[in-house]
Amino acid sequence: MQPPGDSVNTVTSISLSATPAGSLAERFQQLRARTVALAAPLSAEDACVQSMPDASPAKWHLAHTTWFFEHFILADRAPSYRPFHERFGYLFNSYYFTVGQMHQRPRRGLITRPSLAEVLDYRDHVDAAMSALIADSAQDDALSFLVTLGINHEQQHQELLLTDIKHLLYQNPLQPAYTELPAAGSGPAAPLDWVAGEAGLVPVGHDGRGFAFDNETPRHQALLREHALASRLVTNGEYLEFIRDGGYRDTSLWLSDGWSTVLNEGWQRPLYWDEDLEHAFTLGGRQPLDPAAPVTHLSYYEADAFARWAGYRLPTEFEWEAAAARQAPEGNFADSGALRARPAKAGRGPQQLYGDAWEWTASPYAPYPGFQPLGGSLGEYNGKFMCSQMVLRGGSCATPAGHVRASYRNFFYPAQRWQFSGLRLARDQA
């Protein structure tokens, strides 16, 4: 396998394969090839650097997702397998303390060796062993679950690779493009309407059909008051009105921690917006801001402040889920190649529930009644993070298609905004 290209400036487009489909072996192979394709526009220098502690180098994402298959599957289920390198477990473990110690997260960008080429060789080594194991264990349900978990885990890192490299390239005064993006749509945003939501006791959580992470379970009932959801996401143009009306100067709109963050960080606009409020940095470089497109890269604090300014609120995660459960999980995902949020199209019912932008909800990330994490070390995947974070729903333009569903729960700290995160308004019904 050849390492990615020499420069982001030499790559004009990127091929994003379809969602993994077919047999388990085919889905595994498609997934692994897609991750390498996402890294292809990057130089070795791009792939090594870490722009902030919350982000990771692209090279680390390539290696960590490989280590996940190596450690949680090959080490236990392939007796003849020999690790590619005895110290890679220390370098590329993320937060599994029951597995062993790991390199400090904020210092991942200091790992210049192994080289990018060696990391790609590591992927080839593990892929060959995994493909052989899957072929020899086609009817093994336990293995199928672990491989499917690994696929979904790597899809999460495919999104992180995109958001992390966007943050990295933004630090460059030249503001280079990751890839050439298709032309943005034009025209005004669809009118914002209100769609009555389901009220009373509603079933929420994963229904048991297909794959789900443990934090989506168990299925249970939630009591919803009468409410309505906005028919689409909040747009750049609407958020611009908030800014021009002094939204970042009005303390009455902000939660206490949010106002402290605004002051400490000097926030005056969403991440990646220029001071002129007419341009923004994208994965295609600096581009004119589309007033009709959904606003993205907001913190929870900013989303909540905007909702207060507008006279509404954020939906709860279960209000969102009740609406999303009525729709197929289709939308503007990474596979479209747009790699940015697109304006909503006119239509009946709530639009943009899936794709475009992760939607901040008013719900803290907490366990469901009766929640049980996965057994063993994999129990560290989700459960131990159920504190001080907020739930986001729906996926974004950087999320692989087929990865999310109505019950899918994402979570971030309220001040984080380097993800494609936006908002939908909600209101109580009289």
Image: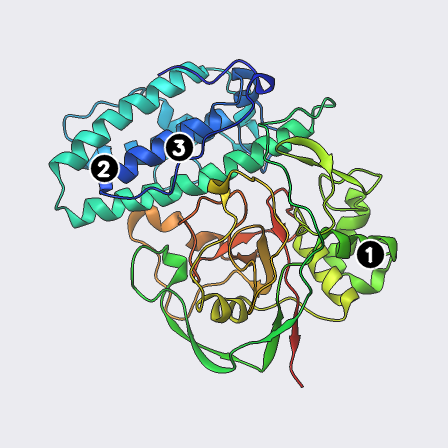
Amino acid under label 2? Ala
CA distance separating discs 1 and 2: 50 Å
Label 2 near label 1: C-beta < 8 Å? no
Quarter of the picture holding the C terminus: bottom right
Task: Say left or right for 384 vs 139.
Answer: right
Which of the two residues, 406 or 80, is positioned nearer the viewer here? 406
Residue 61, percent from left and from top: 45, 31
| Residue 194 visible in the shown view | yes
- What residue is rendered at 49% in x and 16% in y? 5
Image: 21 above or below 248 = above
Label 1 near label 3: C-beta < 8 Å? no
Task: Say left or right for 195 vs 98.
Answer: right
- Residue labelled with disc 3: 34
- What residue is rendered at 84% in x and 60% in y? 251
Task: Say left or right for 156 vs 133.
Answer: right
- What residue is rendered at 53% in x and 32% in y? 56
Q: Which mark is residue 241?
A: 1
Image: 421 above or below 221 = above
State the image quarter where residue 34 is shown: top left
- Residue labelled with disc 2: 25
Image: 115 above or below 29 = above
State the image quarter where residue 151 is shown: top left
- Tag 1 secondary structure: helix
